[in-house]
Each structure stands twice: as C-alpha cells, then as structure tokens.
C-alpha cells in the first residue's frame, strides 16, 4: 500500500503544481514627488507635498511575470517661481505661483521573485501617460523709474487659464507583496519616472487581493 | 641593485601563483553531494526515524532546498508537503537525492515578524506621505 502511494506521488512529482490565482487588484495611497525645473537655479525644482491615491489590477501570465495597469492621481502642489528681466535698463521681477496637478495611467511588466510564498519582492518597468494641469498666478510687477523716483505698475496681478499637457514617460519600479492571508496582501513599492532624467518619484503602500 | 631586488620579489610573488594554476588543483568534487551506498542506507534509516508532521528542511543533491512537513518516509523516498501560501500536493523525493535533512522549529513566528515589519514599513511611508502632504512646501 505504501509502495503504491509512493509510486503515485513520484508520478505526480513532475506534474504541474496547482494553478495560482492569475489576477489581483489593489488600492494604494502614497507620496508623490514631481520634478519641475525652474529658470532660477537656486530655486527648489521638486514638489514634494503631494498625497497620491490610486488603484490597479494585474494579470500573471506566468508564476513570475505579471502585467499591471495602474491609475492614480495626486493632490495639487504649488511651486513658487520668479523671473528677472530688464525694463528700460531697470531690473524687474515677476513672481508667480504655479499650481500643478497630475493624474496618470500606466502599464508595466513585473518580475516577481519566488512562487507561492508569503512574501514576494518584485522589480518592473513600463510606460506611463500622465495628464498634467498647471495654473499660474502672477503677482503684480512693478518697475522703479529712477528719473521720477517712483514705482510704475508694469503688469497687474493676473491668473493664466489652466494649461494641460500629456506626458509619456518610462518608469522603473521595485516593491513587494506581503500576504496577510492566502489571498489578501499588503503592498509597497517605489516608482521612478524618467523623461530626460528623473521626472517623478512615487512611494506607494496599500492593500490588495488575488482572485 | 634595487631594480634586481624588485624583479626578484615580483618573480617570487608571481611564480607560486602560476605554479598553482599550472598544477591544476583539483576542485571540490560533487561527491560531497552524492551520498554513497552506506550513506544512502544511513539517510534512509535516519529519515524513517523522524516523526511524521516534523517541519523539515531538505537539501537535495542538485543544490535545491525544500522546506515542508514530513508526511512519510520509506527506504526509497520521503514524502513532504512544501511550505507554501496556498497548499500544494505532497511531493516524493527519492532518498538518493537527499543530501541533508534537518528539522526546523516552524516558521510561524518568523512569518508573523516579517509581515509585521512589512506592515510597519508601509504604515511609516503612509504616515510620512500624509505628513508631507499636510505640511505644504
């Protein structure tokens, strides 16, 4: 009897293991950091005070390779800018506040380490389409007239209508899934977007489920 | 004189290494991982003494490692169920492929700690994100 059991098990040894869930879905919150170069080199190029929220789903086409689609967006962040220029030989300064907000849709490919374990690190890369909206508020610009010794209003305070643009960026990411139950997991990752250098850094954490 | 001395030192440093390379020192062979017949018998005897239900770590002769629960052991093979998140069918490993079998105390605590750490790291980043978003530039 034991021999029969062994023979059947040995025969099964090379057989495929049971199928693992092929789909997962998740919701995340995170910290978004946008890189927006300024004309003045000593001004901060990074917008860091952005709360991110998103959701996504993935499909495992092997036990280790997964395609993932994510959608998300960040809260509005402000960037303070200044520009110096000359008017009739006199310096003038234009100060503005740019309110920037971004939503994005991405598709990527991940390699997941290990199989059917409780903790799975992963690395990945992909492409992201980001919709960026920018609205700039300008303070009034005055210039000093040395002849009359008075200030003269050059341009009044005004706000430009919002501008939108679509950005296509590549990204690389790394993170992990830590299972709390057989199907529910906690996830964390870091994603870096590239567009002529590092364009955005995103840290995310959330929960998901396999199905 | 200095130059001669330098050349001699260089030659003395290089020659032994070259000698070692030329003698073709025998590398560690795989015989360590291939139990001989008496070893096989000893291994079969040993694994049959382990109680069913033991948490075991199995090193195979091909270098692979399996962690799981021992279900059965005979003269020919052992049957284990691997430690996986989703249960998998037991597998049988021929005794001839066993390089080492050790018992473990179970990984429940380790797993809980790992999940705790992961959750803690995640919570830390979440709180950090909220703090940064709330603080403004």
Image (cartoon, helix red, strand yellow):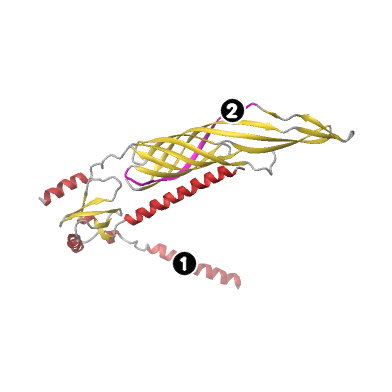
Callout 1: helix, strand or loop? helix
* Whole-percent x, y for residue A85 in the image: 77, 35
Residue corresponding to mark 2: A164
Numbered mark located on residue B15 in the image = 1
Residue found at x 30% / y 47%: B85
Along the line of sight, which residue is nearer the eye, A53 or A202? A53
Q: Is residue A38 visible?
A: no
Residue extending farthest to the bottom is: B1
Which chain is disc 2 placed on?
A
Residue extending farthest to the left is: A1
Numbered mark located on residue A176 in the image = none
Pointer 1 and pointer 2: residues touching (CB < 8 Å)?
no
Q: Is residue B123 above or below residue B101?
A: above
Along the line of sight, which residue is nearer the eye, A90 or A208? A208
Q: Is residue A174 magenta?
A: yes
Query: Disc 1 vs disc 2: which is toward the camera?
Result: 2
Residue found at x 33% / y 45%: A181
Magenta range = A161-182
- Report the quarter where the C terminus of chain A lies: top left
Which chain is disc 1 placed on?
B
Residue A126 lies left or right of residue A136; in this view the side is left
Q: Are marks 1 and 2 on the same chain?
A: no
| Majority secondary structure in the magenta region | strand
Along the line of sight, which residue is nearer the eye, A84 or A154? A154
* Whole-percent x, y for residue B88 in the image: 25, 45
């Amino acid at each position: 009897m034991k021999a029969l059991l062994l023979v059947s098990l040995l025969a099964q040894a090379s057989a495929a293991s049971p199928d693992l869930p092929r789909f997962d879905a998740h919701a995340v919150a995170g910290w978004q950091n946008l890189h927006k170069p300024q004309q003045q080199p000593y001004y901060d190029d990074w917008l860091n005070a952005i709360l991110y929220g998103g959701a996504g789903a993935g499909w495992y086409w092997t036990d280790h390779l997964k395609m993932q689609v994510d959608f998300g967006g960040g809260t509005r962040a402000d960037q303070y800018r200044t520009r110096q220029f000359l008017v009739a030989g006199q310096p003038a300064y234009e100060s503005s506040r740019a309110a920037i907000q971004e939503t994005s849709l991405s598709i990527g490919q991940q390699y997941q380490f290990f199989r059917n374990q409780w903790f799975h690190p992963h690395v990945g890369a992909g492409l992201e389409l980001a919709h960026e909206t920018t609205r700039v508020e300008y303070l009034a610009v005055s210039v000093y007239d040395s002849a009359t010794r008075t200030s003269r209003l050059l341009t009044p305070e005004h706000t430009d209508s919002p501008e939108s643009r679509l950005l296509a960026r590549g990204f690389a990411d790394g993170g992990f899934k830590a299972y709390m139950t057989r199907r529910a997991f906690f996830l964390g990752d870091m994603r870096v977007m590239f567009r002529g250098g590092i364009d955005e850094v995103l840290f995310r954490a959330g929960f998901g489920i396999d199905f | 004189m200095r130059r001669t001395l330098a050349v001699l030192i260089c030659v003395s440093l290089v020659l032994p290494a070259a000698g070692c390379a030329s003698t073709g020192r025998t590398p560690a062979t795989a015989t360590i991982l291939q139990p001989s017949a008496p070893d096989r018998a000893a291994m079969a005897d040993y694994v049959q003494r382990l109680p069913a239900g033991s948490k075991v770590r199995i090193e195979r002769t091909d270098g692979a490692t399996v962690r799981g629960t021992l279900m059965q052991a005979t003269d020919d093979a052992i049957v284990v169920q691997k430690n996986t998140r989703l249960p998998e069918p037991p597998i049988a490993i021929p005794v001839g492929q066993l390089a080492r079998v050790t018992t473990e105390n179970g990984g429940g605590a380790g797993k809980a700690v790992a999940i705790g750490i992961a959750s803690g790291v995640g919570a830390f980043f979440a709180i950090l994100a909220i703090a940064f978003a709330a603080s403004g530039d």
